[in-house]
Structures are given as C-alpha cells and as structure tokens.
Amino acid sequence: MDIKHVLNTKQFLNEDLLVDIFKKADTFEKQDRENSVPKVLDGKVLACIFYEPSTRTRLSFESAMLKLGGGVISTESAGYFSSAIKGETLEDSIKVIADYSDAIVLRHPEIKSAERAAQVSSVPIINAGDGGEEHPTQALLDLYTIRKEIGRTDNIKVALVGDLLHGRTIHSLVYLLAMKENVEIFFVSPKELEIPESYKEFLKSKNIKFSEFSDLSQVVSQADILYMTRIQQERFSDKKIYEKVKDCFVLTKDMLSELKKEARIMHPLPRVKEIGPEIDKDERAAYFRQARNGLYLRMALLSFLLE
Ligand code: CP
C-alpha cells in the first residue's frame, strides 16, 4: 500500500487498493476463526491516543494489533490523562509518542488534527476521527460490510440518515461511495443537520445521483442500505437545537415492514434511540456484524502499514 498516513478516504479512491485491503481482512477473519493469525507485527508497538471517548475504534485497533503479535500503548481521555492538560501542544506530544511507537492511532476533537499530527510524525498517523470531519477507517469497514452483507458495492441505493452535518462516518463514506458504479444516495436529516455543501459539490462533480429528505419513511422502501446515525449531542453549541432534533429519526418495526428483504440496516454505533433493541433480532440488522468487521479491516490496515 503506497500510503504512509491514513488521514481521509480520498486516499483510498482506488478499486485495486480496496480489493487488496478487503481480501486481507477476509483472510484475517478466517485465520482468526481457526486461531492461526500469523504474528507478523511481532516487536512493533501501536500507540492509541484518544482525546475523545471510544469503544469500538480504540479497542478494535488494540485487539487487531495484539492478534497480529504486536504491542499497544494507549491513553484515553488524552486531554486529561496526557501532558495536554499541562499545556503541551498536539505537535509536541506526537513527536514524542512517535519515538515510542511504530504507528499512532489518533482521535481528536479538532478538524484537521490528524493532518497536523502527520506533518510532525516520523511514524504513520491513523485518523480515528478528527472532530466532525472524517473517520476513514470506519468508512472502509462500512464499505467492507456492505460488500459482505449484500455481495456488491455497485448498483446500490444508500440512505444516510441522521446527523449529516457532524457525522464524520457519513462524510468519509460519501467519498468512498462516489467511486462506485450506479450508486444513488438519499440524505435524510432535519434541516439543521443537512450534509454540508462541499460533499454535494463533490458528488455532482462525480455525477453521483443524490436527493435530500426530511422524512425517513420516504426512503425506507427504496434503500438497499439504511445507514442510521446518532444525533451528536456533544457537537452542538446551541443545546436548544439539539433538544429540537434529538429524536427526529427512530426506526420502527412498522417501517421495517417496508424495508426490502435483502436490504441491510447499518449504524456505526454507538446508538441512542434511533434503533431500539427490538430491531436487533431482524436478520437485516447488520450493525453488530459491522462493528466486528472493524477488527478484521483494522488488522488488514495495520498489516499493510507496518509489515
Ligand atoms: N463507530 C465508532 O467510531 O465508535 P466508537 O466511538 O465507539 O469508537
């Protein structure tokens, strides 16, 4: 893989590269089930530096590194439990951590923080979420999940639902979907949380068909992939707006009766109220399988970056 840092999904707009990554993830899943993952990263160290909370991204990266024979150093709540609390800049922290590790997974609340880190880092930086901008490894595992679940990533209709303004997983996934053939995107959000103009301009430049809705029930019957997201309370400066929109889209059992039999419901998780636990038993509910795929996709990425 001719990529040093994983900063955004525009770096992955290459079909051959995606096929290689997905095949490697398939192989690691098979080897993991057989308890035969090769320890190809023996002696390497991964630093997971998270200034924002995480369950899936941090722990799946850590698990991926351990399964491949490497070691992990990490800090969660890095804004409090690293020397950032004493005033150390992100750049100084990264320069030091790069001397202790072979790659750094970074989650930070500021847009472009991963790019800033990459400018001073001697080891690969993996963007695990930079504010409301991008979350490239999530989008890669999302596309990988679509391929596994419905057997194709071309000729699909994808409904992206919820907080499209702050949803970094949505932003990263839009770029990946735009490289596929005959994809149609339905953006479903309240007016206050519409997808930013730059993403629409990008889709227009690639001749990707898209439309915008404010009512979830208008798209459920058409979607092959129903990608739900959480309204991100932590990104609102005006809490009154959050209160107004927080429960705007809830997937109900009635709506599921409209969903195609072969369609899939995805969610990057964590969820709040947009998908209740009563939906989990539906075989179209793919979000926990999606989270598991993150482990294998991240094993593949680490192997490409560090072997
Ligand atoms: N999907 C995702 O990024 O989950 P976490 O915030 O738990 O890492």
Image: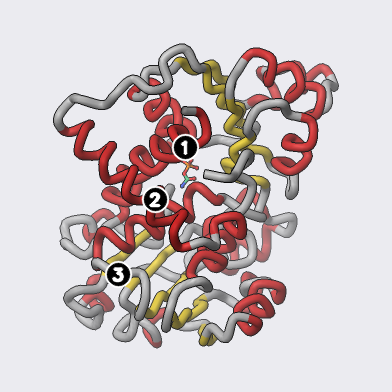
- Residue 166 lies, in percent from the top left, at 63, 59
Toward the viewer: 202 or 53?
202
User: Horizontal and vertical percent for residue 296?
Assistant: 34, 40
Q: Establish whether ligand 1 lies closer than 8 Å to the Cβ of label 2.
A: no
Q: Residue at 68% across / 79% down in the picture?
A: 201
Could you tell whether 215 is left or right of 284 in the image?
Answer: right
Q: On the image, numbered disc 3 is attached to which residue? A: 152
Give amino acid for label 2: Asp
| Residue shown at 22% from the left, 58% from the top | 278
Report the residue marked by disc 1: 304
Q: Which of marks 2 and 1 is nearer the N terminus?
A: 2
Q: Is residue 115 above or below residue 133?
A: above
Tell me if I can see residue 195 in this picture.
Answer: yes
Say few, some or many: other residues with alpha carbon within 10 Å of mark 1 (under 14 / 14 to 19 / 20 or more): some
CA distance for labels 3 and 1: 24 Å
Q: Which of 192 and 247 is in front in this view?
A: 192
Q: Position of residue 6 (x, y in %)?
A: 60, 44
**Residue 224, placed above or below residue 228:** below
Instruction: Please tell me whether mark 3 or mark 1 is closer to you in this view.
Output: 1
Labels 2 and 3 touching (C-beta < 8 A): no
Q: Can you tell which mark lies on residue 20?
A: 2
State the separation of the CA atoms marked 2 and 1. Answer: 10 Å
Q: Which residue is drawn at 38% across and 43% down?
A: 297
Density class for disc 3 (Cα within 10 Å; few <14, some 14-19, many ≥20) is: some
Marks 2 & 1, CB-CB < 8 Å contact:
yes
Q: What residue type is labelled 1?
A: Phe
Few, some or many residues within 10 Å of mark 2 (<14, 14–19, 20+): some
